[in-house]
């Protein structure tokens, strides 16, 4: 399945980010709560969407279990993305592709750390 996923990433058409307007390739990200519709690039996802989601979670009452569940779902999603990119690195067909996946993997790992830190402390630290 990882090989299919890599091919899908490589063959993806360029898309336009619904937040910043720049073109990107590969998978888009759900832009909610920054935008209701469209796909956003990884930069906007990491710099705007994820912090906005975390901020929304922090506005809810502490007694509410839903924010913790939402944050845990985000953490699970990041962990799945990390596994995907680790497999993509193993199956890279050249050094350029490998370097790209390593860069994306590093960003995913930073965001996972940010989410886990927030889950533990309740403080948002933008890396």
Image (cartoon, helix red, strand yellow):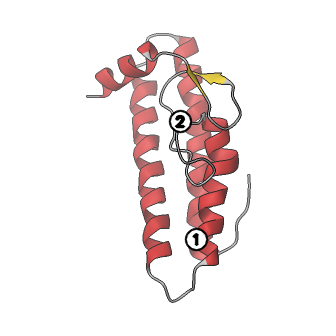
Among the 4 quarters of the image, the one containing residue 14? top right
Nearest the camera: 111 or 56?
56
Residue found 74% across the figure and 56% down from its top:
126
Q: Quadrant of the N terminus?
A: top left
Q: Residue furthest bottom?
A: 63
Whether residue 73 is situated above or below residue 108 in the rendered picture? below
Nearest the camera: 120 or 12?
12
Place of residue 62 in the rendered image (x, y in percent of width and height, measured from the top left): 56, 86
Q: Residue furthest front?
A: 36
Residue 57, label in figure:
1
Nearest the camera: 56 or 99?
56
Residue 93, label in figure:
none
Residue picked out by circle 2: 39
Residue found 59% across the figure and 60% down from its top:
53
Secondary structure under tag 1 reads helix
Place of residue 75 in the rendered image (x, y in percent of width and height, measured from the top left): 47, 58
User: Closer to the observer: label 2 or label 1?
Assistant: 2
Whether residue 12 is situated above or below residue 124 in the rendered picture? above
Nearest the camera: 46 or 14?
14
Place of residue 44 in the rendered image (x, y in percent of width and height, measured from the top left): 66, 40
Q: Earlier in the sequence, mark 2 or mark 1?
A: 2
From the viewer's perspective, is 102 left or right of 73? right
Residue found 46% across the figure and 26% down from its top:
89
Place of residue 104 in the rendered image (x, y in percent of width and height, measured from the top left): 58, 33
Residue found 40% across the figure and 36% down from its top:
84
């Amino acid at each position: 399945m990882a090989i299919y996923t890599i091919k899908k990433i490589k063959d993806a058409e360029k898309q336009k980010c619904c937040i910043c307007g720049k073109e990107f390739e590969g998978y888009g990200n759900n832009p909610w709560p920054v935008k209701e519709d469209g796909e956003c690039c990884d930069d906007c996802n990491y710099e705007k969407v994820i912090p906005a989601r975390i901020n929304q979670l922090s506005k809810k009452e502490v007694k509410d279990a839903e924010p913790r569940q939402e944050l845990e779902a985000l953490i699970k999603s990041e962990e799945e993305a990390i596994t995907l990119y680790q497999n993509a690195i193993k199956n890279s067909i050249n050094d350029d592709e490998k370097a790209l996946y390593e860069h994306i993997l590093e960003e995913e790992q930073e965001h996972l750390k940010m989410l886990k830190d927030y889950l533990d402390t309740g403080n948002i630290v933008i890396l």
